[in-house]
Amino acid sequence: MNKNKYVEIFAREAEEHLQLMRQGLLAMEKGGASGEQFNQLLRSAHTLKGSARMVDLLELSTVAHHMEDLLKELQGGGRELSPAVVDLLLVATDAIEALLAQASAGGTLSVNVAPIIEALRAGALPEQTIESAATNAAHPGVERRRSVRASVERLDQLTNCMGEILLSRQALAERQRQLLTLIPVMDSFLVQLHRTENHQRMKELRSSFVRIVSDLEQDTVHLGYQAEDIYQRAMELRLLPLATITEDFERSLRDLARTLGKELDFTVTGKEVELDRTVLDLIKPMLLHVLNNAVDHGIETPETRLHAGKPSFGRVHLSAQYEGAFIQIVVSDDGQGIDPAKVRGAAVKRGLLSADEAARLSDEAALYLVLQPGFSTREFITDVSGRGVGLDVVKTNLDQVKGNLTLSSKIGQGTEMRLRVPSSLAMFTGLLVEADGETYVIPQQYIVEILRLAPTEVRTELGREVVRLRERTIPLVSLAGLLSGASRSIEDELPEGRVSVVVLNFRDQLLGCLVDRAIGLHDVVVKGLGSQLKSLDYISGATLLGAGTPALIVSVADLYGARQTSEGTRLREAHAARQASAKRGRVLVVDDSITTRTMEKNILETHGYDVTIAVSGFDALEKLSGNSFDLMVSDVEMPGMTGFELTKKVREREETRALPVIIVTSLASADDRRRGMEAGAQAYIVKGTFDQGVLLETVEALID
């Protein structure tokens, strides 16, 4: 089996785990360790270990394995969580990142992780090894920043818009062809206009031209709408959260503070605020420069702060929030502040101002001198912050994005810099849902939540279909059934597993609305229905979607009024019919690693099995409750519930007691194999010796 194609899947999964580990380590160092934090770190390390082994990245798996061992030692109290140990674990994440880049580059990069593996065994890392490892791991990340991760939803919207534009282009071509066919007809009549009977035919020909021209105008307007919308969608694909750049700041500032012998509490709010990728690329260096200056020149040493009556640790805070069509970013610290007198003196010394000009400057205006090119004082420029480069880099980058900034500072209390940069805002006011092949909009203010229910979770009370939500009974109606006004067979359209139910709240009354799928929240512009459609039941208006196609807006009040006369969804009936006709060969794959479950799913589906995946033991139990399977393949170490515990629960249930279970795990000891057999598994496969032939032979042997 060629496993190279799974490396990219693993790389995406690994990046998320590495980010979780870095954030967790820094949070534990700052606020102390908790059992759940250790569990999260152990889960990430274990997943990296097992998934890397599945794709033959053995060095990476080894690093993750020794990280897991060290974390278990820390959790058990055998070793203290000191800054040096945090350094070691952070460098180990850098090493894994470097190995990922090496794998993505096909081995053209050289990464030596032997010293780090040895250090993980010993629990300490020499200083020179830290610097070397950090340097080696820095380059791959730069390359990955050239790519942009876009949501599937946004890509689907953009694709839909492009399809609509292509259809509009075809319509315009057809209109043009129609016009061209009329030209020779008109020419043939031009010489015969003196005959009375041709006058009427010419009027008809003219009417045809007017109609086609009118249609062509409408098509042109439609194409214009699509072109504008696809441009907007393309711009949205470039939007990234501020966290994309701020997640790297915490570790950078932590290391800087330690180098300077200072204590630091760095916090960020507004990480979810989205900006264009180009804006992010431009503001990242200036934000880092501002933050470095805050730590290097603003925050005092612990002794100085204690003497001034401050806490020993300095506070630096970065916040972001939407402000109209702009994003406001504020960087503040509680350090020593900027002394306007020193700024004036430095400006005069460097020839930027005369003594008289400097004297006439107000303290507020003097602060902005630090933004002048080449401005430097001992208070603002050091080797750490960038000798010879002042805060003019901030102003230069802001000018490129047409932004603005304001400065304020109080001596002994701190400094605040407000940056204002442009961005596109994502505003969502309605939930797009699909029902019977049509798209509708439900106003967001009525939506409580979206449920994913198994058909067996639908109950019948007093002749009405209902669902239970947090001890409340909620009536259930079908949106498609209400809007069509006719009986609808849903057996063929019933999705595998669970169905989507939108829970609505109107005047403190809950109502479950069955839909084919919930597409997502979108900004909508309400359009009138016109006199021809204003009497439509359950509809209050219309809107144009991103693709330029109309969507009707649901009147939630009308839905509540009609729920008593609705015939229901008949979900249980349809589910029973499907279960009766279901064929054998259905396999449930349970694994919290996307790499492992994707590989197993592809292997089994390629050989004709119907595969359903579950991401945890709890998810597996839910799927087992609403579906019938012929076999289950499960990992062992998963969050919340292990594979052994899941297997025991499967054996305890009457409906799944005879279900064959295969354990696929990286745990290879004899004790672990014994535990798997005692839990009730029929087979035990170790990931380290994983072979698709073994898996397929085992599945075939256990499914009659």
Image: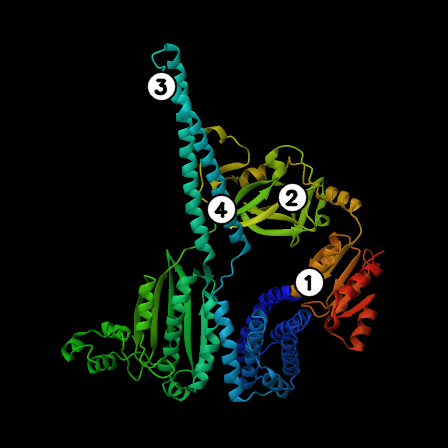
Q: The residue tagged with tag 3: helix, strand or loop?
A: helix
Identify residue type, mark 4: Met
The label on residue 54 is none
Q: The residue tagged with tag 4: helix, strand or loop?
A: helix
Tell me whether circle 1 and circle 3 mark residues in contact (CB < 8 Å). no
Identify residue type, mark 3: Leu
The part of the image, by quadrant, that contains residue 409 is: bottom left
Label 1 vs 3, first from the N-terminus: 3
The CA distance from mark 3 to mark 2 is 68 Å
The CA distance from mark 1 to mark 2 is 38 Å
Q: Nearer the viewer, mark 1 or mark 3?
A: 3
Identify residue type, mark 2: Leu
Q: The residue tagged with tag 2: helix, strand or loop?
A: strand
Tell me whether circle 3 and circle 2 mark residues in contact (CB < 8 Å). no
Label 4 vs 3, first from the N-terminus: 4
Residue wearing tag 3: 190
The CA distance from mark 1 to mark 4 is 32 Å
Q: Nearer the viewer, mark 1 or mark 2?
A: 1
Q: Nearer the viewer, mark 4 or mark 3?
A: 3
- Residue 28 percent across, percent down from the top left: 55, 78
The CA distance from mark 1 to mark 3 is 72 Å
Tell me whether circle 1 and circle 4 mark residues in contact (CB < 8 Å). no
Q: Residues within 10 Å of mark 2 (few under 14, many from 20)?
A: many
- Residue 535 percent across, percent down from the top left: 51, 30
Give the quarter of the figure containing the N terminus: bottom right
The part of the image, by quadrant, that contains residue 356 is: bottom left
Residue wearing tag 4: 162
Residue wearing tag 1: 599
The CA distance from mark 4 to mark 3 is 42 Å
The label on residue 476 is 2
Q: Nearer the viewer, residue 51 or 614?
A: 51
